[in-house]
Amino acid sequence: MPTARIAIIGAGLSGLCAAFLLEQKGIKDYVLLEARDSLGGRIASAPATSGAQAFDRVDLGPTWFWPGYQHQLASLVADLGLQSFEQFEVGDTVMERSPQGPPVRMRGYASSPPSMRLVGGMAALTDALHRRLDATRIHTGQAVRRLRSTERHVELVS
């Protein structure tokens, strides 16, 4: 496992953002360790159709954000130059509650403040952060199993 002054465990949104903030401050003595082979944590977006462009993705995890409540997230989205749009809220909603039952039509609702989505899905956010990081600091396939404190440092054990 690599050696660094700062270890960030997990390359989901929080870990990627932590590394991004360190880099913005000129701090390079860090490693970002991710157990999986891919980055983004619970944020995942898949192509809407085969051969789709990066902006044509469907969210498989988190989908919306609320700039009216999530001010820091809204600032990050703006700082990264990502495009957002208001979630469509007019009309009814059709929901499939189970594979055994038919879809159910429900009355739609509007959220206030409005919920927003990102062009390219929420993975556009984690992708943008990843592109701004030093790739040599990111290590996938590194599951941290335990921490061990010594007199001089903390060891991460995989």
Image (cartoon, rainbow, N blue to C red):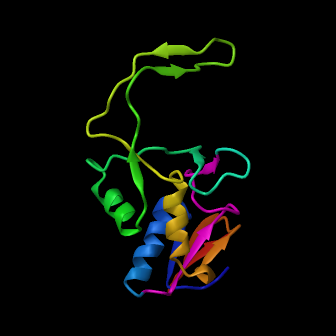
Indicate whether residue 57 is drawn in magenta.
Answer: no
Taking 115 as reference, is 138 left or right?
A: right
Residue that appears at 36% across and 69% down = 79
For the magenta stretch, what is the residue range?
A: 27-47
Image-quadrant location for residue 37:
bottom right
Viewer-nearest residue: 146 or 125 = 125
Image point 56% across, 54% down: which residue? 55
- Which secondary structure is most common in the magenta stretch? loop
Q: Position of residue 114 (x, y in %)?
A: 31, 40
Return the x and y of residue 109 as percentages of the image width and height: 35, 25
10 and 99: which one is in front? Answer: 99
The quarter of the displayed image where residue 77 is located: bottom left
Q: Is residue 16 left or right of residue 74?
A: right
Residue 151 vs 157, above or below: the answer is below
For the point 61% across and 66% down, the residue is: 146
Place of residue 51 in the rendered image (x, y in percent of width and height, measured from the top left): 72, 52
Q: In this view, does 73 lie above or below 31?
A: above
